[in-house]
């Protein structure tokens, strides 16, 4: 018997190629089907940052098939949590959503050595987010 996800989460950054893709990969990996995961960008690029893909592969999470997507109003409205990572005023706000802004360095144009600390910070934040979602369910 499968149950509905506990929450839906949308990760947003400008290019939807690094931070938001790593965050989506972590949340999918760590929460499984308990959480519905989306990611998008205010100005998406053609492909996910290869250094982000490599950094995630190092810890056993494959985001190589992910594709940057444009941020839509529908994606925001369908999400319980909207987590922005430097998209500034490009992210519209709707009532009834939990908005979090994660100030993270942008991995664009950086090699895997520079991306690893960003990846590790995202993992820490994802683990805290999962704990928050679980705590709200139990409340």
Image: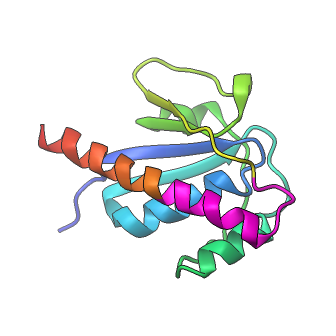
In the rendered image, the quadrant that contains the C terminus is: top left
Q: Is residue 64 visible?
A: no
Q: Which residues are magenta?
A: 107-123
Above or below, 72 against 11 in this view is: above
Give the total number of marks visible in the rendering.
0
The N terminus: image quadrant = bottom left
Left or right of 34, for residue 135: left
How far across and how far down the image is residue 46, in percent? 85, 59
Q: Is residue 80 left or right of residue 135?
A: right
Vertical arrangement, residue 50 with respect to residue 17, above or below: below
Kindly identify the residue that appears in the image at 54 percent across and 51 percent down.
38
Residue at screen point 23% across, 65% down: 2
Residue 92 appears in the figure: yes
Q: Quadrant of residue 3?
A: bottom left
Please identify the quarter of the rendering in which residue 72 is found. top right
Question: Main SS of the magenta segment?
Answer: helix
Color theme of the render: rainbow
Outermost residue to the top: 95
Q: Is residue 136 magenta?
A: no
């Amino acid at each position: 018997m499968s149950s509905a996800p506990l929450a839906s989460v949308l990760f947003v950054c400008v290019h939807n190629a690094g931070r938001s893709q790593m965050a989506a990969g972590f949340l999918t990996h760590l929460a499984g089907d308990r959480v519905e995961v989306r990611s998008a960008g205010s100005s998406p690029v053609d492909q996910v940052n290869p250094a982000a893909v490599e950094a995630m592969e190092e810890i056993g999470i494959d985001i190589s098939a992910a594709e940057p997507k444009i941020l839509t109003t529908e994606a925001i409205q369908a999400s319980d949590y909207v987590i922005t990572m430097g998209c500034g005023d490009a992210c519209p706000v709707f009532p009834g959503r939990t908005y979090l802004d994660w100030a993270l360095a942008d991995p664009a144009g950086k090699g895997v050595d520079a991306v690893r600390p960003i990846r590790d910070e995202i993992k820490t934040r994802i683990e805290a987010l999962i704990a928050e979602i679980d705590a709200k369910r139990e409340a």
